Structure formats: C-alpha cells, structure tokens
Amino acid sequence: MRRLLAAVAAVSLFGVGLALGAQGSTSAGYTTVVVQPGDTLWSIAVEHYPADDVRVRVDDIEQANGLAGPTIQVGQTLRLPS
C-alpha cells in the first residue's frame, strides 16, 4: 500500500511540474513558455500581451530568443520579455 501511495504521489508531482513548465515561469524580466501544438508566435503574443501591438510583441519575442523568423517548434522554450 505504501508503494502504491508513493507512486501516486510521484506521478502527481511530475504532472504538476509539467503543467507549471508549460504555463511558464518568470525570471529576470522574462517569462518562459513551452511551445504547445498549434502555437504560433502570433498566438503566444496575443495571449501574453493582450493590450499591446501584436506585431511589435512578435518582433520582441523573436529578438529575445535569437530567432531569424516566426518559425517555432513544439516543445521549444521561449523567453517572453516583460
């Protein structure tokens, strides 16, 4: 029974860690996000900067991550400037 409870606790903690990683964290003026299926720089900018000019924010994200264009990959971690 103890092993079962330990396994359930470990899986739960792992799931919480993945969820937090996908949602992002804040560090030194940046928020990090993990690109999910269907995400684009445009959709990420709209979600994280709803009151800002999306074109400017897409450019900001590209610059913060050293991207030469808008192409991103699922699982990629992006830094979003504050």
Image (cartoon, rainbow, N blue to C red):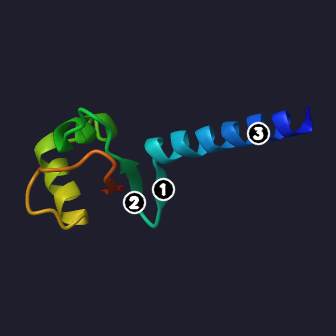
Front: mark 3 or 1: 3
x 59%, y 46%: residue: 17
Q: Say which residue appears at 32% left-offset and 55% top-offset.
A: 78
Tag 3–tag 2 contact (CB < 8 Å) = no
Q: Do the residues labelled 2 and 1 touch (CB within 8 Å)?
A: yes
Of callouts 3 and 2, the N-terminal one: 3
Is residue 39 found left or right of 22 in the rendered image?
left
Residue 14, given in percent of the width and then of the height, sits at 63, 44
Mark 2 crowdedness (10 Å alpha carbons): few <14, some 14-19, many ≥20 = some
SS assignment at label 1:
strand
Q: Are marks 3 and 1 in contact (CB under 8 Å)?
A: no
Q: Where is residue 35 in the image (x, y as percent from the top left)?
A: 31, 44
Q: Quadrant of residue 43?
A: top left
Q: Nearer the viewer, residue 28 or 53?
A: 28
Is 19 left, or right, of 35 in this rendering?
A: right
Label 3 SS: helix
Q: Is mark 2 on a helix, strand or loop?
A: strand
Q: What residue type is labelled 3?
A: Ala
Task: Pick whichever of labels 3 and 1 is earlier in the sequence.
Answer: 3
| Residue underneath mark 3 | 7
- Pick the quarter of the image with the C terminus: bottom left
- Residue assigned mark 2: 30
Name the amino acid, label 1.
Thr
Whether residue 53 is visible? no
Query: Which residue in the protein does label 1 denote?
Result: 26
Q: Quadrant of the N terminus?
A: top right
Question: Three-letter amino acid code at disc 2?
Answer: Tyr
